Amino acid sequence: MIRVGIVGASGYSGEVLVELLSSHPGVELAAVTSRSLAGKPVAEVFPRLSHRLGSLQFTESDASALAQNDGLDAVFLALPHGVAAGFARPLFEAGKTVFDLSADFRLGSPDVYKEFYGQDHPDPELLKAAAYVLPEFPLKGWQEKPLIACPGCYPTSILIPLLPLLASGTIQSKDIIASCMSGVSGAGKKANEDFSYCERTESARPYGQPKHRHLSEIEEQLASAAGSPVILQFLPHLVPMRRGIVTTISVPDNGKTAEDVLVAWKSQYANRPFVRILEDGTLPESKNVVGTNRIDIAVRHDARMQRLILTSTEDNLLKGASGQAVQLMNLKFGLEETIGLP
């Protein structure tokens, strides 16, 4: 059994981690922390999971205490950027495996981090020890790394369709446009008028344009696959649904067809259990992936515009966050990739 802890379990991603890890047959959920809920039974806060949680209580979010807990093998950080790094350092030094769901270790450059996040990177030295890992497109040797940066929700929805195409030369690296729609849970669990029911229901709006923070992560990973810089137009939108991301990507066809795209996708994802390639004429729809760790992808060729249209859908809290983190844990510790995941 892998003994794990969750730091910051009161947010949406943290709650999903509690749900997944408390029922995972290869895991013992040994520590759940929250500054605001310390001392409360976890089952009291998440009553629908009470049958799994026993007497487990929230404890203070104390990095030193977690680092000194010899019974913990791995710790998931469900914390905001800028905060997670402060926990990662003592856990890393104590030899724990760290899965970070924040943005603190997703970028290779402290300068790019400062440009997009508006502050100095909190631990540039530790950044060198981290591995950014998309399970379906991993770098060789990543399982030896003790600090794993889990991809963001929007980036996952864009990288899965694009990475094999850039790596294989099926598409070019210029004039890529990605328009994405996200459910409100992507903004996190916070009291904010902009995300209240009356403000969000019956209303959709663009935001974070033209330089959303996730753009840095997307471009860095695409450039790595392409072998040259990639500049992408990223157009996020907030839509009135609780969960899910729907992404449409438009790229020049470069003389290629939809069948060429399918060949590249199948070559990369043929044996990947959480990627479903739609070929039966249907297009991805959020209701078909919400509640699962799957991403659905499809392609259409617009011959009139000489462009390829790539679409994807995922659950932003599962494949876009906590589910993907558990998927990485499974792979890192040599478990079956799908175990404990819907």
Image: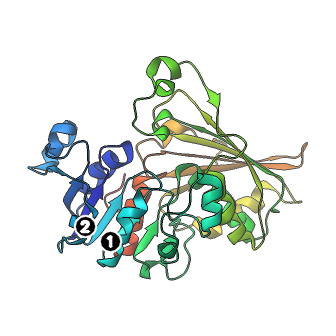
Q: CA distance from mark 2 to mark 1?
A: 6 Å
- Does the image show residue 335? no
* Residue 92 in which image quadrant: bottom left
- Circle 1 is placed at which residue position? 90
- Circle 2 is placed at which residue position? 64
**Disc 2 secondary structure class:** helix
Q: Of 219 and 125, which appears nearest the observer?
A: 125
Q: Of 134 and 268, which appears nearest the observer?
A: 134
Residue drawn 31% across the image and 65% down it:
75
Residue 112: horizontal and vertical position, in percent?
65, 62
Three-letter residue code for mark 1: Pro
**CB contact under 8 Å: marks 2 and 1:** yes
Residue 81: horizontal and vertical position, in percent?
47, 54
- Does the image show residue 178? yes
Q: Of 256 and 97, which appears nearest the observer?
A: 97
Q: Residues within 10 Å of mark 2 (few under 14, many from 20)?
A: few
- Apparent side of residue 254 relative to residue 240 in the rendered image (left or right): right
Residue 6: horizontal and vertical position, in percent?
28, 57
Residue drawn 52% across the image and 23% down it:
200
In the depicted structure, whether residue 85 falls above or below residue 54: below
- Apparent side of residue 65 relative to residue 294 in the rendered image (left or right): left
Tell which circle, 2 or 1, labels the residue nearer the N-terminal end: 2
Three-letter residue code for mark 2: Ser
Q: Residues within 10 Å of mark 1 (few under 14, many from 20)?
A: some
Residue 291: horizontal and vertical position, in percent?
40, 43
